[in-house]
């Protein structure tokens, strides 16, 4: 009978300790050390009150177990909070990377626009002038750091003169640009040529300004899906 009464007290102490601990675990305290100490203490006091020394031991064990559960829950909350912060930082980095890529594209476009100039020639001339030479040097610099880019040269002449003469003149013009690029280190396999003479002329008869624009070599850059027709010079 005494043993049965003692066991009942131990079980009651354990249950009460668990109830006390669960109630305490729901409180919003800041520090784990204080939480666990208070949890163990609450369970131990309840166990001692109902079960004496044995109840005290049971209460301490129950309190320690549930205190660890409280600690793990706190750690999980901290991990989830850190994960949220990391996700926010990752999103900020993604946005920054996107903005940087946009800026790079804008700078590349600006650089190409700066280079996007036709090579013009004087009347009956077939050699680039000083201004055209500077543009071609800039083009060479671009081609040197973009080895997959290829060059298409199209030569033209204004409509004055015989067709055969104009065709030969446009060929000499396109050849002069090709030689410049090759002499600067651009391999001939990257360069293709076409000469049209005055066949595509749209200038009105006697329009000197229009004639000047048709004494030209245009330069088109191509090279795979990323550079297909990226610029016409």
Image (cartoon, rainbow, N blue to C red):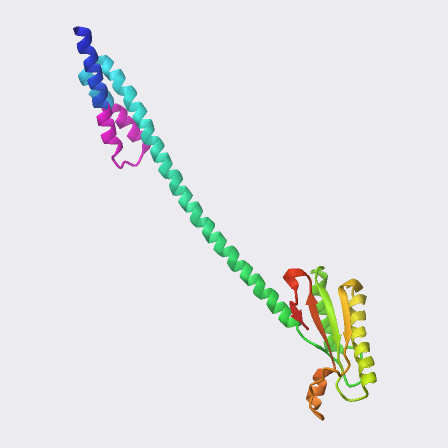
Task: Report whether residue 92 is seen.
Answer: yes
The residue located at (19%, 11%) in the rendering is 6
Q: Main secondary structure of the magenta part?
A: helix
Above or below: residue 183 compared with residue 173:
above
The answer to which quarter of the image holds residue 3 is top left
The residue located at (39%, 40%) in the rendering is 80
Question: Which residue in the rendered view is the most extreme toward the bottom?
Answer: 206
The answer to which quarter of the image holds residue 216 is bottom right
The residue segment tinted magenta is 18-42
In the rendered image, which quarter contains the N terminus?
top left
The answer to which quarter of the image holds residue 112 is bottom right
Q: Position of residue 135 (x, y in %)?
A: 71, 73
How many marks overall? 0
Judged left or right of residue 88, residue 33 is left
Judged left or right of residue 2, residue 74 is right
Judged left or right of residue 204, residue 167 is right
Q: Position of residue 133 (x, y in %)?
A: 75, 74
Task: Report whether residue 140 is seen.
Answer: no
Q: Position of residue 32 (x, y in %)?
A: 32, 32
The residue located at (74%, 72%) in the rendering is 153
Residue in front for this viewpoint, 172 or 103? 172
Q: Position of residue 168 (x, y in %)?
A: 83, 80
Residue in front for this viewpoint, 74 or 169? 169
Q: In the rendered structure, does residue 29 fall within the stretch colored magenta?
A: yes
Q: In the rendered structure, does residue 116 fall within the stretch colored magenta?
A: no
In the rendered image, which quarter contains the C terminus?
bottom right
């Amino acid at each position: 009978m005494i043993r049965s009464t003692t066991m009942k007290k131990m079980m009651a102490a354990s249950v009460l300790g668990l109830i006390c601990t669960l109630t305490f675990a729901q409180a919003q305290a800041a520090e784990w050390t204080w939480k666990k100490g208070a949890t163990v203490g609450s369970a131990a006091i309840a166990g001692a009150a109902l079960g004496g020394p044995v109840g005290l031991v049971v209460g301490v064990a129950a309190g320690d177990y549930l205190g660890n559960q409280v600690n793990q829950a706190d750690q999980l909350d901290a991990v989830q909070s850190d994960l949220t912060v990391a996700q926010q930082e990752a999103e900020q980095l993604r946005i920054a990377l996107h903005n940087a890529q946009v800026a790079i594209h804008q700078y590349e476009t600006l650089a190409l626009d700066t280079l996007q100039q036709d090579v013009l020639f004087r009347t009956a001339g077939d050699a680039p002038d000083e201004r055209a030479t500077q543009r071609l040097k800039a083009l060479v610099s671009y081609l040197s750091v973009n080895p997959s880019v290829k060059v298409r040269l199209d030569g033209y002449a204004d409509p004055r003169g015989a067709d055969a003469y104009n065709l030969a003149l446009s060929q000499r013009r396109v050849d002069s640009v090709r030689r410049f690029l090759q002499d600067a280190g651009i391999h001939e396999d990257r360069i293709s040529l076409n000469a049209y003479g005055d066949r595509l002329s749209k200038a009105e008869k006697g329009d000197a300004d229009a004639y000047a624009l048709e004494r030209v070599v245009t330069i088109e850059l191509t090279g795979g899906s990323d550079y297909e027709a990226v610029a016409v010079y």
